[in-house]
Image (cartoon, helix red, strand yellow):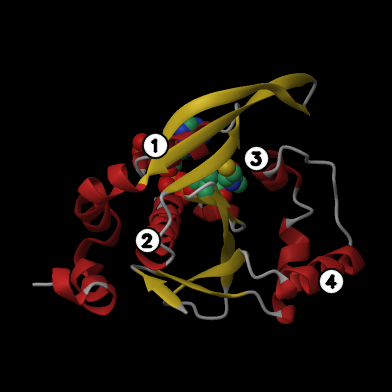
Amino acid sequence: MFEFGDIRFRPIEKDDLKTLHRWENDFELIMYSRSKPINFVNMTQLEKLYEEWVKDKKHLRFIVELRTHAKEALGIARLQLGTWGNVRTADVGTYIGKKALWGKGLGQQITVALLEIAFNQLNADRCEAWSVEFNRRAHKSLEACGFKKYGAARQVAFVNGRKWDGYHFDILRDEYLPMRMELLEQTLNEKTEEYLQKHCPALSS
Ligand SMILES: CC(C)(COP(=O)(O)OP(=O)(O)OC[C@H]1O[C@@H](n2cnc3c(N)ncnc32)[C@H](O)[C@@H]1OP(=O)(O)O)[C@@H](O)C(=O)NCCC(=O)NCCS
């Protein structure tokens, strides 16, 4: 388990597949997260995917839950570590399945937790994320965590009657470290000290 402020990352269990089945077939949610809102997935397909996830060592997938509501999934977070030359890049992503919780700062908390895992546990050199042009909420949430838009793939998605670009965002380790304490304090508030004591004892007061 990885606890970060109000949230906890834990492994995806078979019991979570029912919840994932609901989310992965939610038109609006999938429109934003994958920009393929009509690509529904049935339980058999999901079970097969789950068997692949279990074997996949490079792609970490987590259920996100509130620490106050253990066993009640609120979304998922994922991180895939890859190496190109000598540079280690973590591709990160998340969605909040409980739509009533959108826009309340949880996305920022989840993304900073992913950055902490990438830079503080996996020794990544950079992190990147992808988001479709119309997903303003995701762009703002990523930018609030220090990500910068570095390019756009033109017209890669066709949704709701038109083509959209796909935006690429990244953040370098060298950019993250100087802003780290500010981001931790911004997302963790009074839980900052608790986190530092557990994960970076040298930095706690
Ligand atoms: C994207 C997602 C993870 C962001 O998490 P969140 O908790 O909703 O977002 P946050 O509260 O951290 O930040 C949202 C930001 O967008 C702004 N915002 C909220 N609603 C918005 C809207 N409808 N349009 C534009 N901006 C919006 C907020 O003001 C905030 O910006 P600020 O930090 O500058 O104040 C979440 O909304 C989600 O799961 N969406 C559906 C799936 C998805 O898009 N996944 C990401 C794919 S890249």
Callout 2 touching callout 4 (CB < 8 Å): no
Q: Residue at x 29, y 42 (%)?
A: 175
- Residue 27, by quadrant, is top right
Give the alpha-carbon distance from disc 2 to disc 3, as whole Å.
24 Å
Total count of labels:
4
Badge 3: residue crowd in 10 Å (few <14, some 14–19, many ≥20): many
| Residue 130 x, y percent position in the rendering | 58, 39
Give the alpha-carbon distance from disc 3 to disc 4, as whole Å.
23 Å
Q: Amino acid at mark 3?
A: Tyr
3 vs 1, front mark: 1
- Considering only order in the chain, which callout, 4 or 3, is on the residue closer to the N terminus? 3
Return the residue nearer the eye: 107 or 50.
50
Label 3 CB sits under 8 Å from any ligand 1 atom: yes
Give the alpha-carbon distance from disc 3 to disc 1, as whole Å.
17 Å
Badge 1: residue crowd in 10 Å (few <14, some 14–19, many ≥20): some
Give the alpha-carbon distance from disc 2 to disc 4, as whole Å.
30 Å
Residue identified by numbered label 4: 47
| Residue 28 x, y percent position in the rendering | 70, 42
Q: Amino acid at mark 1?
A: Glu
- Considering only order in the chain, which callout, 4 or 1, is on the residue closer to the N terminus? 4
**14, above or below 96, in the image:** below
Label 1 CB sits under 8 Å from any ligand 1 atom: yes
Q: Amino acid at mark 4?
A: Glu
- Residue 134, by quadrant, is top right
- Considering only order in the chain, which callout, 1 or 3, is on the residue closer to the N terminus? 3
Residue identified by numbered label 3: 32
